[in-house]
Amino acid sequence: VASAANGLDGAVRLTAPGQADDGVHRWLAERRRSNDFAVTRIPFAEMDGWRFEPESGDLGHESGGFFSVEGLRADGAAMSWSQPILNQPEIGILGIVAKEFDGVLHFLMQAKMEPGNVNTLQLAPTVQATRSNYMRVHGGRNTRYLEYFRGAERGHVLVDALQSEQGAWFVGKRNRNIVVQVTGDVPEHEDFQWLTPHRILALLSSDDVVGMDCRTVLSCLPFARPGGAARDAFTDALSRSYDPAAPARHTSTEILSWFTEAKSACDWRVSTVPLAAVPGWSRSAGEFADDARRNFRIVGVRVAAGNREVSSWSQPLLEPRGQGTATFIARPIDGVLHLLVHARRQPGLRDVVEMGPTVHLPPDEEPAAADRYAEAAADPGRVRFDAVLSEEGGRFLDARTRYRVVEAGPDFPVEVHPDYHWMTVRQLMDLVAYGHHLNVEARTLLACTHSLG
Amino acid sequence: VASAANGLDGAVRLTAPGQADDGVHRWLAERRRSNDFAVTRIPFAEMDGWRFEPESGDLGHESGGFFSVEGLRADGAAMSWSQPILNQPEIGILGIVAKEFDGVLHFLMQAKMEPGNVNTLQLAPTVQATRSNYMRVHGGRNTRYLEYFRGAERGHVLVDALQSEQGAWFVGKRNRNIVVQVTGDVPEHEDFQWLTPHRILALLSSDDVVGMDCRTVLSCLPFARPGGAARDAFTDALSRSYDPAAPARHTSTEILSWFTEAKSACDWRVSTVPLAAVPGWSRSAGEFADDARRNFRIVGVRVAAGNREVSSWSQPLLEPRGQGTATFIARPIDGVLHLLVHARRQPGLRDVVEMGPTVHLPPDEEPAAADRYAEAAADPGRVRFDAVLSEEGGRFLDARTRYRVVEAGPDFPVEVHPDYHWMTVRQLMDLVAYGHHLNVEARTLLACTHSLG
């Protein structure tokens, strides 16, 4: 029996020091050395089991599983376009097992190889598996630790929500983001290590260490930040931004209404179309790319790996050209830190609109649409967080985004364009629990905000 | 500046007597007399502007607007079927204007004619308009009172959420449910009347008076129910069920996790297909129906009306065979009323699963799938609410559902099947504000629950 009050039942406290700072990098380097990974680009024709459908031109696996590369068409009054898109209708599990040691919560993190990862191996959730993976549709090993998320051994749920992924590259993709707390013994494996949330958050400031799937699960957790001596007005306002009783610029009704308005105002009609029906893109032996060479391209790779469910395979990957940027502009309002959230349209999001960073420029997008606050977001003197982090290495090749939290300058307006809204950290944490409110870039930046102090 | 606490900012109090009880029925009867409505069944060939596409067999309007009748195909491991479905991708507005008179909140209700309505005319929201309606795509009059929802004259928002409609009959349909409170003078029109929420809720127990669009908007509002002298243990538990501090059987994290699990477990893949590709259905001059005559059928009507945006038109309607039933089983748990909510799969829901009544049997559905608690739901000695209410008369012809709230008997289990969860009224009110959590039948029953006392 629990309180019926809306809101989060528990919170993960952000103060849990006492863990050595260098162990993780050493462990990751060691795991990288002891696993024999090899990722090689290959022509499409050499991919096992993958083929372009003669009629539609779609690129898919002969089993009908995994994912496929199809076309997407978006039509609105103001604009209309087609593009290739990844279609992966299955809901996978991104799950973290949590356990207290000496009264301090730890998360069981995985050193996981993905073919598209910068540095091959990054920190991942305890379980990161598509439904086909864990149902063993394609053979392979049991998914380690799956029993803590499904069936009788399931732990106490701290958070459990469906969340979107890159709306420019996936159509309707979503994964189940879940954290369970267990009390019994958990068998250890050399690819896994118990880390405190504090330590994982601190690792966010190292480039390309904490993977996207780990960041999105972390971002769903309710964190609490005790007050106390603050370094400056910004960090004092940050602490207060976690307090449900702190004054916020907008009520939750106002925020939900703004979000409803943004969805209602978007007239985009999105549908999947045959890949062959996407004009301006063509296929060579080794890539599927736009003729202007401005967008991402699709390539094929062969992977040989020691610690995967299947030890060798080939697959397509989406390779962006260049690096994206995603920035939250933040400022204290009445002594409480607020982040400037953008109602962001992306064709692959299930509702087309989710809440995004103040400025988000994917590598393959024209600047015009997103540059309203780009100048303020680039102010180097006011950067509070700055790291280059990788997007999902199982689907994207060398896809990196520069994530920043930037303090608004004294001239930055409190009154903003109607597509934007100021929100407290607490309000974002409450929304993320319902799923499909914050897009994946905003969720990464929410996790980065938790790492500030 | 408001509290950042998650939850509802204000609440509509459920005690506001002082309004005569018979005025509404008289007014509706008078409006019915003074408007010259005529609805006539016609062959499809006589419908103006509507036609079956030669290739796909889809039934649509030549403008591409309004809605169309297409095919839907659902595939899962356990079952697979096709059926006709209404496709209306536009987001319409279902809006109520609220205003205080002598300190008591009133809602501006419309006596609105719809061609499929039982009794032709029922209570509707202030504004009930598709986007094409209010943008005047098809000509016609301005939508009355629209200015309170859009643009400069917009009132203070009490609630604003996108909600689903019948998941068995619509694919992906959703409308914006919004209530705005205004303070200035509002011009009056003979088809509109100010009513207290108390009075509207009381009208729910009259058959076929409060229309579906009115019920769904009402269900989104946060109501408060002051304690006090209760008639019995049930009504005492009902009052306590509105209290955010009252003990609930499940935390909100548990409820959201259960909902996420239900969505993740459903393997249905749903797509629209050409109507001509739906087997077992065929078209005659006057109907599109399944050969077994078990399901709904599509028919054509001609409408002549005095107070519509366009004074005469023809259109298709979906006509179910027989009457549906929808029941919430309710019981006090630890002195707080809980409703038994079902994680309900319907192919046309955007996420396939939403929270539904304990038992919901559409007129055209086989009983087997939904009869787990059907016997308890039919117990006539324990019925707390019982009325036959109409579904949306703009799309459905004589579609009626018997809505009931039934108190669980002493033998009814507290431990229920995993597809079901006990929730307090407060928990349902909190969830409904986020949209797409409660399906339209559960929302009607939530409104009916507010009418109990």
Image (spheres, coloured by chain):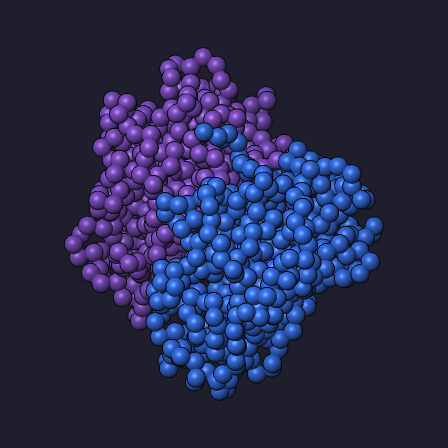
Chain colours: A purple, B blue
Q: Residue at x 50, y 49 (%)?
A: B97
Q: Position of residue B29 (x, y in %)?
A: 61, 66
Q: Nearer the viewer, residue B276 or B131?
A: B131
Q: Residue at x 38, y 17 (%)?
A: A233
Q: Position of residue B88 (x, y in %)?
A: 44, 65
Q: Nearer the viewer, residue B93 or A401?
A: B93
Q: Position of residue B153 (x, y in %)?
A: 39, 45
- Report the label total: 0
Q: Nearer the viewer, residue A139 or A429?
A: A429
Position of A160 relative to A229 (above/below)? below
Instruction: Tell me if B329 is positioned left or right of A95 in this view.
Output: right
Q: Is residue B416 visible?
A: no
Q: Position of residue B169 (x, y in %)?
A: 53, 67
Position of B115 relative to A131 (above/below)? below
Instruction: Tell me if A421 is positioned left or right of B322 in this view.
Output: left
**Residue farthest toward the top in the current orientation of the protein:** A229
Position of A61 relative to B339 (above/below)? below
Position of A82 relative to A440 (above/below)? below
Q: Residue at x 55, y 42 (%)?
A: B100
**Residue farthest toward the bottom in the current orientation of the protein:** B285
Q: Nearer the viewer, residue B379 or A192?
A: B379
Quarter of image, res A64? bottom left
Q: Residue at x 77, y 57 (%)?
A: B383
Quadrant of the snapshot with the N terminus of chain B = top left
Instruction: Tell me if B409 is positioned left or right of A67 in this view.
Output: right
Q: Is residue B322 visible?
A: yes
Quarter of image, res B376? bottom right
